């Protein structure tokens, strides 16, 4: 009877409880405001249970200890499922290793959020795809440790990769929904550098859309100074080297340094938190956005970039203030070349004068520009990256021009 009564009361929805002993060998328990007489042993058991519940409510919550750096790294690796050995096929990334097991090939689809108003992929999209496939190549090699492509030996030596030079040539911009094949591979560049190249093709046509080459060096993660390549790192990556170039550059001209007397200057550019990468500095793709924002909107509406060369000098952090400078190369204006954008029957002067967009389209623009990004350090500016861009006109038809 006592156990049955105790079970009955333990299943009640209790809002407020109390137990009072009386002189008859029993007691009364109040549950949700109603009094119930119970035998002594049942009341004692309920009193103990109530006291324990109250003690539990008064006890401060036990806070879990934050994981150690090693535990956090282990959890990340488990979630990422980073391979510890070389993989030849990655079904999730639609990627394979080809050409004797050293060249990486990935199939990608151009997404809706990667294109601009003209439904073609933006330059930032192209650069992001190059960066992603490079990291995935290291992933499949079984050498990936942490950070942007750092190998196990690099982590041991506290080293990270930084890009020192990049050259991208765009023959055609892919459109929304187009399926691409991106090949990338690495090679040596002097004693302490590494070269990485890319080819971007249309999967159905096989036509080459983009060619790119880049040079990478090592930086100490703590001191932020450039470092020589340790032997153990070279031993890791040298079996992947291919002596092949996506762009035959030959002798390269040095990009001149601009000053604030340039034609276009945009000051007080500030990085956002979303601009930082895993190495805690501004991603190099963001630099390109700042460089191109100095160009006039009218020029960008009529032209598309066909080549960009970048020479990186210094990294940029989240608290830096950046200045973007741009100077057009007036010697690259082609006489009469802008008129060729109008196709079809010749237009009367009245039509030309009546359509401001068409008159603007007939304006002559230089096809090459020099760029400089610099950050403000105390009372002086320090270079972040120099750039050189080459442009070509977008294709227009007479119907496209007149409908504006």
Image (cartoon, rainbow, N blue to C red):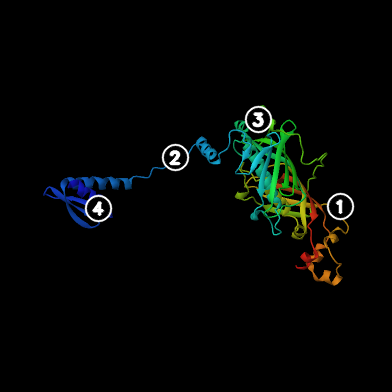
Residue hosting label 2? 65
Q: Outermost residue, front direction?
A: 204
Judging depth in this view, the residue of 166 and 327 nearest the camera is 166
Q: Earlier in the sequence, mark 1 or mark 4?
A: 4
Q: CA distance from mark 2 to mark 1?
A: 65 Å
1 vs 3, front mark: 3
The residue mark sitting in front, 2 or 3, is 3
What residue is shown at x 79% (from left), y 58% (from top)?
A: 395
Real-space Cα distance between discs 1 and 4? 92 Å
Q: CA distance from mark 4 to mark 2?
A: 35 Å
Residue 180 appears at what percent x and percent y?
Answer: 69, 48
Dot 2 and dot 1 residues touching (CB under 8 Å): no
Q: Which residue is mark 4?
A: 17
Q: Are marks 4 and 2 in contact (CB under 8 Å)?
A: no
Q: Residues within 10 Å of mark 1 (few under 14, many from 20)?
A: few
**Front-most of 340 and 124?**
340
Label 3 belongs to which residue? Answer: 236
Q: Is residue 159 left or right of residue 265?
A: left
Element at label 1: helix
Q: Which badge, 4 or 2, comes first in the chain's sequence?
A: 4
Between label 3 and label 4, give the one nearer the viewer.
3
Residue with the mark numbered 1:
331
Tell whether 390 sits left or right of 270.
Answer: right
Considering every residue shown, the one lying at the far top of the view is 231
């Amino acid at each position: 009877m006592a156990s049955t009564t105790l079970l009955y009361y333990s299943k009640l929805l209790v809002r407020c409880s109390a137990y009072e002993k009386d002189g008859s060998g029993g007691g009364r328990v109040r549950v949700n405001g109603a009094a119930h007489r119970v035998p002594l042993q049942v009341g004692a058991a309920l009193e103990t249970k109530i006291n324990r519940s109250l003690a539990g409510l008064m006890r401060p919550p036990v806070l879990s200890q934050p994981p150690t750096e090693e535990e956090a790294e282990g959890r990340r690796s488990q979630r990422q499922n980073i391979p510890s050995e070389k993989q030849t096929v990655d079904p999730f990334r639609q990627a394979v290793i080809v050409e004797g097991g050293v060249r990486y090939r990935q199939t990608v689809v151009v997404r809706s959020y990667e294109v601009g108003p003209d439904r073609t992929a933006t330059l930032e999209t192209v650069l992001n795809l190059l960066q992603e496939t490079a990291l995935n190549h290291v992933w499949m090699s079984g050498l990936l440790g942490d950070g942007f492509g750092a190998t196990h030996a690099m982590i041991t030596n506290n080293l990270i990769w930084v890009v020192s030079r990049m050259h991208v040539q765009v023959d055609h911009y892919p459109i929304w929904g187009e399926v691409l094949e991106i090949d990338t591979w690495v090679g040596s560049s002097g004693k302490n550098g590494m070269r990485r190249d890319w080819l971007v093709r249309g999967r159905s046509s096989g036509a080459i859309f983009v060619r790119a080459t880049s040079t990478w060096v090592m930086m100490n993660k703590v001191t932020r100074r450039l470092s020589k390549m340790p032997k153990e790192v070279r031993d890791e990556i040298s079996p992947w080297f291919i002596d092949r170039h996506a762009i035959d550059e030959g002798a390269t001209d040095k990009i001149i340094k601009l000053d604030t007397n340039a034609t276009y200057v945009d000051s007080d550019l500030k990085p956002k938190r979303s601009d930082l990468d895993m190495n805690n500095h501004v991603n190099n793709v963001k630099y390109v956005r700042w460089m191109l924002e100095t160009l006039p909107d009218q020029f960008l509406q009529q032209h598309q970039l066909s080549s960009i060369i970048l020479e990186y000098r210094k990294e940029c952090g989240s608290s830096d203030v950046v200045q973007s400078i741009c100077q057009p190369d007036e010697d690259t204006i082609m006489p009469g070349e802008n008129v060729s954008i109008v196709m079809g029957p010749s237009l009367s002067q009245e039509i030309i004068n009546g359509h401001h967009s068409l008159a603007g389209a007939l304006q002559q623009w230089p096809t090459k520009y020099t760029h400089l990004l610099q950050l403000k350090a105390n009372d002086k500016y320090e270079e972040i990256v120099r750039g050189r861009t080459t442009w070509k006109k977008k294709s227009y038809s007479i119907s496209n021009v007149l409908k504006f």
